[in-house]
């Protein structure tokens, strides 16, 4: 059921790094993105798929992890992603990518959950450094990096209490808590 997949699809930042994700799985995930909606059907997104340790390390070095967890520099060795999908916008096809990369990323992450994997959509990227590390052409703009692997953490949704914070946090058991506003708070009007 789609609601179950969406509920399970929390950002995962700790992975079983020793459990590989193969290129066939990455291609299957990108095919989900390919089949997803695209503004004006331009389909300007391109992808770099990586499941090689050396390249994974180069990608990892370009990423920022969990801005709200100030005392956490990111996953330790052994808990890093087993694979990455770098989402690119091809400026030879479009100048503005609208929300295409968000739609594509969500399709990929839902597919990953269906396969028992988890992921994290990362926008905090040293783009110049990653562009060089991957040897990308100038017309390819890095939009997002998706970190993927078998989850090594549990994430749960909690209700935001009145006046409460939306900042995610970890408890003493390292469970990742993601506060969510209530449905009544986010729906302004219903016209029946």
Image (cartoon, rainbow, N blue to C red):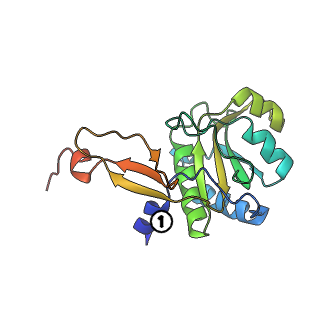
26, 8: nearer the viewer: 8
Find residue 102 and report its horizontal and vertical position in percent: 53, 45
Instruction: Determine the residue positioned at 59% across, 39% down.
Output: 72
Residue for badge 1:
5
Q: In this view, does 58 lie to the left or right of 25?
A: right
Give the mark count.
Answer: 1
125, 134: nearer the viewer: 125
Quadrant position of residue 124:
top right
Find residue 159 and report its horizontal and vertical position in percent: 31, 52
Q: Which residue is farthest left?
A: 192
Say what secondary structure mark 1 lies in: helix
The quarter in which the N terminus is drawn is bottom left
Q: Badge 1, how many Cα within 10 Å: few under 14, some, many 20+?
A: some
Instruction: Determine the residue positioned at 30% across, 47% down.
Output: 160
The quarter in which the C terminus is drawn is bottom left
* On screen, residue 119 above or below 140: below
* On screen, residue 4 above or below 57: below
Q: In this view, does 147 lie to the left or right of 105?
A: right
């Amino acid at each position: 059921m789609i609601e179950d997949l969406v509920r399970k699809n929390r950002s995962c930042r700790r992975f079983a790094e020793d459990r590989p994700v193969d290129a066939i799985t990455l291609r299957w995930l990108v095919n989900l993105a390919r089949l997803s909606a695209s503004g004006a059907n331009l389909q300007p997104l391109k992808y770099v798929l990586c499941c090689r340790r050396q390249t994974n390390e180069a990608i990892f070095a370009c990423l920022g992890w969990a801005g709200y967890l100030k005392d956490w520099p990111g996953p330790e060795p052994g808990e890093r992603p087993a694979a990455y999908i770098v989402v690119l916008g091809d400026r030879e096809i479009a100048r503005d990518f609208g929300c295409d990369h968000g739609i594509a990323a969500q399709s990929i992450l839902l597919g990953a959950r269906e396969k028992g994997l988890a992921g994290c959509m990362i926008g905090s990227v040293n783009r110049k450094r990653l562009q060089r590390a991957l040897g990308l052409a100038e017309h390819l703009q890095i939009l997002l990096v998706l970190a993927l692997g078998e989850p090594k953490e549990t994430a749960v949704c909690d209700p935001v209490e009145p006046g409460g914070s939306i900042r995610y946090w970890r408890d003493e058991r390292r469970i990742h808590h993601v506060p969510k506003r209530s449905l009544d708070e986010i729906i302004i009007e219903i016209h029946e």
